Image (cartoon, rainbow, N blue to C red):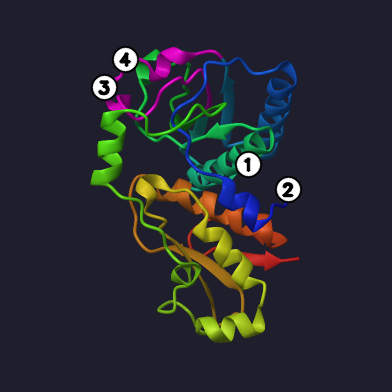
Amino acid sequence: MAYTIEELRKRHSVRSFADRQLPDEVAVALQAEVKEINDKYPTIRFELRLDEPQVFTDFKKTYGMFSGVRHYLLAVVDTTDTNAEEIAGFAGEQFVMKAQTLGLGSCFVGATYDAEKINLNLAPNEKITFLIPFGYKQGEGNTEEYLKRLKDSPRVTKTPDTFYADEMAFFNLSEALTQMPWLQQGLDALACAPSGMNKQPVRVWEGEDTYIHAGLAETNPYTSNDLGIAKYNFQAVVPGRWEWGVYGRFFKE
């Protein structure tokens, strides 16, 4: 589904949720989105968990960071597929944007949840790659601990041109934009992409083959997810299709 830059910019991480059930029509729409994702990508498994607050309750890592979580998306990947975590990030952002169109807030979560309270049978080749709590927004940063965390780790906002890797490119940014004016939209979309620890490590560049490629400025346990999330945002505003993997090419329609 295509989105505008304005719609992508409206997405932000929500950590405090209202104590509300989802209307039936919203739950049905989310279930349909999850089914579509699972049917399309066989090496990932998304599960919608409604009214399961225990995963974010009484867990020391969540104190001051999350409140009122009742619903979440569970993302499981097949570890034998080297691209599965990237695909999960791509599909996770698809789910997040769908939730936003339904009036819901959300947040990607890599570690701050109680895995022992998740009722789930994993195959030997499977693992949980992230959770996405979602629901109606209550308000954010309303505890002393969460405000302290924000102060200690202020959010860094990168400008769109930051996401073009001149050191990897055959053509510099000015040349690339002359050949591909639509690249600016893609860079704007990358600047809106959520990422683990807000690192925003994904970069793109035009190669000698005249394709746009995507790669990583750094790596950490979340960068495969981040690569997929960023590719989704780019593709949401520029019609086309990405190859999976680092150095994957973008085929514009």
Earlier in the chain: of badge 1 and badge 4, it is 4
The residue drawn where x is 58% and y is 71% is 212
The residue carrying mark 4 is 58
The region drawn magenta spans 51-74
Classify 10 Å Cα crowding around label 1: few (below 14), some (14-19), many (20 and above): many
Helix, strand or loop at disc 1? helix
Label 3 sits on residue: 60
Mark 3 secondary-structure assignment: helix
Q: Residue 240 is drawn in which quadrant?
A: bottom right
The Cα atoms of the two marked residues, 2 and 4, are separated by 37 Å
Real-space Cα separation, disc 2 to disc 1, in angstroms: 9 Å
Residue wearing tag 2: 1
The quadrant in which the C terminus is found is bottom right
Q: Amino acid at mark 3?
A: Lys
* Residue drawn at x 38%, y 50% as measured from the top left: 198
> Which badge, 2 or 1, is on the more N-terminal residue?
2
The answer to whether residue 11 is seen in the rendering is yes
Secondary structure beneath dot 4 equals loop
Where 155 sits versus 51, above or below?
below
Please say if the residues under marks 3 and 2 sit with CB atoms less than 8 Å apart: no
Q: Could you tell whether 221 is left or right of 99 in the image?
A: left
Q: Which mark is residue 97?
A: 1
Q: Is residue 243 visible?
A: no
Q: Position of residue 98 (x, y in %)?
A: 66, 38
For badge 1, the amino acid type reads: Met
- Residue 2 coordinates in the image, percent (x, y): 72, 52
Q: Are the residues tagged 2 and 1 within 8 Å (C-beta)?
A: yes
Along the line of sight, the residue nearer the viewer: 86 or 148? 148
User: Mark 3 and mark 1: span between their CA atoms?
Assistant: 29 Å
Q: Is residue 58 magenta?
A: yes
Q: How many numbered badges does the structure rendering display?
A: 4
The answer to which quarter of the image holds residue 23 is top right
